Amino acid sequence: MIHSDRRTRALAACLSALAGYVDAIGFLKLGGFFVSFMSGNSTRMAVGLAEGTPQAAEAAGLIAAFVVGVVAGSLTGRLARRQGRAAVLLLVASLLAVSAALGMANATLPAMGLLVMAMGAENAVFERDGEVRIGLTYMTGTLVKIGQWLTTALMGGERFGWLPFLLLWLGLIAGAVVGASVYPHLGLNGLWIASAIAVACAFAATRPESRP
């Protein structure tokens, strides 16, 4: 992230906001489960197993769908090669659109499955050499980076190395606020907006990355 150019950072912040938007909608629809934050779902699964409640199976299903989405996104990006980012984002847009359509048909279970897959696939946007360079749907590592770069600044090093990571976190928060505000009015139809944003980001991603 720190070595990326401004356009890449802007795209990452936009996609982080998209993840927050979608996660808020999914969280409200599922009544406390996440569609992009699998650490939270892992804890819900563990608590469900300890208590012997059906929440364990629900959380496990969401985690499995997320992993399938990551695989689909990674395969898409690697096959598309130079246009990998755009291809992955078009995959994300398609999954979100189908999820919205299924939501309109009251097919909630498959809609949620595709929603989680979309968030898993989004994490492959910035994959390179089999490693994710910028995490988009999980913020614990980002907050750690903020703390580490703030420490570097306090020690006389790079003064603003923490800023790109702060923008990622703020993007997620802003997107989640919008998603939570939209859901009472649009429900899963709000995913059409998310799909359109993913398409716009795909077009933005067709431009090659320049040096920072």
Image (cartoon, rainbow, N blue to C red):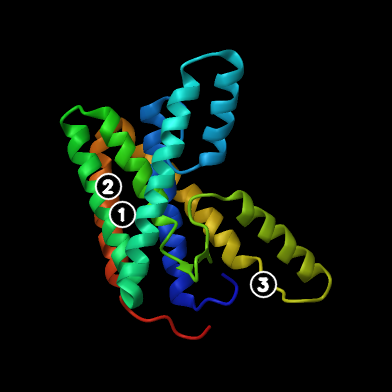
Identify the residue under disc 2: 96
Residue sitting at 55 percent across and 13 percent down? 52
User: Dot 1: within a 10 Å radius of its alpha carbon, few (fewer than 14), some, or many (20 or more) residues?
Assistant: many
Whether the residues at callouts 2 and 1 have beta carbons within 8 Å, the answer is yes
Disc 2/disc 3 C-alpha distance (Å):
35 Å
How far is mark 1 from mark 3, CA to CA? 32 Å
- SS under mark 1: helix
Extreme residue in the bottom direction: 211
Q: Which residue is at a point 41% across and 67% down the rendered structure image?
A: 11
Q: Which amino acid does label 3 sit on?
A: Phe
Label 2 crowd (10 A; few <14 / some 14-19 / many >=20): many
Relative to 179, residue 18 above or below: below
Q: Give the left or right position of residue 3, taking residue 202 as reference.
A: right
Task: Look at label 2 and name its amino acid.
Answer: Leu
Q: State which quadrant residue 183 falls in.
A: top left
Left or right, 177 with reference to 156: left
Please name the residue shown 67% across and 72% down the image: 160
Quick check: 200 left or right of 121? left
Mark 3 — residue? 160
Residue 144 drawn above or below residue 64: below
Q: For mark 1, what is the residue?
A: 92
* Coordinates of residue 157 in the picture (x, y in percent): 78, 76
Left/right of residue 165 with respect to residue 112 in the rendered view: right
Q: Which residue is farthest right?
A: 155
Look at label 1 and name its amino acid: Val
| Gap between marks 2 and 1 measured at Cα | 6 Å
Q: Which of marks 2 and 3 is in front?
A: 2
How many residues crowd around disc 3 within 10 Å: few (fewer than 14), some, or many (20 or more)?
Answer: some
Q: Horizontal and vertical percent for residue 185? A: 27, 33
